Amino acid sequence: MLTRTPFRRATNRPARRQIIPALATLAVSALALTACTAPAASTEGPEFSDWAAVHEAAQGQTVKLWMWGGDDQGNAYVDDVLAPAAAEQGVTLERVPIADTKDALNRVFTELQAGRTTDGAVDLVWINGDNFRTGKQANAWLCDWTGLLPNMSAVSETDPLLTKDFGTPVDGCEAPWHKAQFSFVYNSATVPNPPTTIEGILDWAEANPGRFTYPAAPDFTGSAFLREVLYSVSGGHENVPSLYSDEAFAELSPALYERLDQLAPSLWRDGTTYPATSEQLTKLYADGEIDMMMTYGPATLTALVENGTLPETTRVLTVDDGTLGNASFFGIPSISGNIAGAMVVANEALSVEQQLAKADPAVWGQFTVLDVDALSAADRALFDALPRSPVVPSFDVLSRNANPELSAEWVPALDDGWRTRIAARQ
């Protein structure tokens, strides 16, 4: 847990280094130019010496949570479970569905560019990875606030998934929400003997033309698949430096693109087109057009099987060489007008009750960020008593031999290379 020191709203200083993803909007580009040429307005917010002061300031506030709206279970959890719990704490939580997390970041950047210093439209964001890094470089996130959250005491201080976000130090600029593990999913009725390595999956795809594909980058899942294959063709994640450099990219990426180019003719529709999103990939699998898919959010699979969207023979593949693991967080924009309320929501989301509800496959099935071994015996028993999914293995099983995420700078570089070296050839 971070040291609980008095909180002060972060000062918006000009970013030392600005790397904007290729698909960022003009709002982001405009901010990048301004941040490099002139200091941002310095704003200083209220100080909270302890949690009682935060809780008092939060009373009556309405917190707008901007989050990807494509997960029905996630939406229902926030609306039906987290929001009522926040209301009991005196805070109204309103979910703002968005198509992409960049939409929230771009809104914050636009308001920063316009000189707005308080009362921003975004109070809380479900975020991680490149979006977090980009916002942190632009001083868009409030920092040094998570140490005041009482429920952070149940979070491990040394868990690497929670201290760094795709290689970017968290530094109290976001509060953990849940963990995720990249997973391959297959239909056991049509794939009775599934492969158990990444290269084995690619070999299987070539031996079964048209029955496998992956989302086009920069879809989040498609981007993760690129990193999985990069690790595989490099002989393991140990051979890929976490920190991005042009030299490492030039040395290691050619083998990745060569392997994907070799794979392309065996993909769905001969690799002439790719699903644009992970949702489209799931639909292909649900419709029986492919026999295997992938997801960075296996939590949704149990419900999709139970409601008949996916075949009942759907199973998650455990991969011997491991898969990528990461965590999702809550970030508070530095210009939010409801900082105290956002902190109360983030703290409530870390409670045993909320983490337990969210981990239930019937609710959402997300993996907890709490250090379960450090909980009381009674609380540990509650997690142990959660129903087991017949589709998704436990986190301990799924995260065995987990691969670390690369630093966020790798993501746009690999995505851009895929577009120019793979997609452009089709």
Image (cartoon, rainbow, N blue to C red):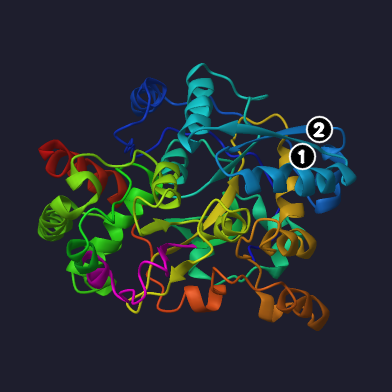
Which range of residues does the magenta coloring cover?
181-202
Q: Is residue 190 magenta?
A: yes
Amino acid type for the residue under numbered disc 2 = Gln
Residue nearest the viewer, comparing 124 with 401: 401
For label 1, the residue is 341
For label 2, the residue is 61
Q: In this view, does 53 lie to the left or right of 254?
A: right
At a point 62% along the width and 43% down the height, the residue shown is 72
Q: Is mark 2 on a helix, strand or loop?
A: loop
Which quadrant of the rendered structure holds the N terminus? Answer: bottom right
Q: In this view, does 257 lie to the left or right of 73?
A: left
Q: Does the magenta stretch include residue 159?
A: no
- Residue 386: image x %, image y %? 72, 72
Q: Is any atom of residue 78 visible in this view?
A: yes
Distance from disc 2 to disc 1, alpha carbons, whole Å, reads: 6 Å
Residue nearest the viewer, comparing 199 with 110: 199
Q: Residues within 10 Å of mark 2 (few under 14, many from 20)?
A: some
Relative to 128, say whether 57 is above or below: above
At a point 31% along the width and 49% down the height, the residue shown is 411
Q: Is any atom of residue 240 visible in this view?
A: no
Which quadrant of the rendered structure holds the C terminus? Answer: top left
Q: Quadrant of residue 189?
A: bottom left
Specify the farthest residue to the top.
114
Q: Residues within 10 Å of mark 1 (few under 14, many from 20)?
A: many
* CB-based contact (under 8 Å), mark 2 and mark 1: yes
Amino acid type for the residue under numbered disc 1 = Gly
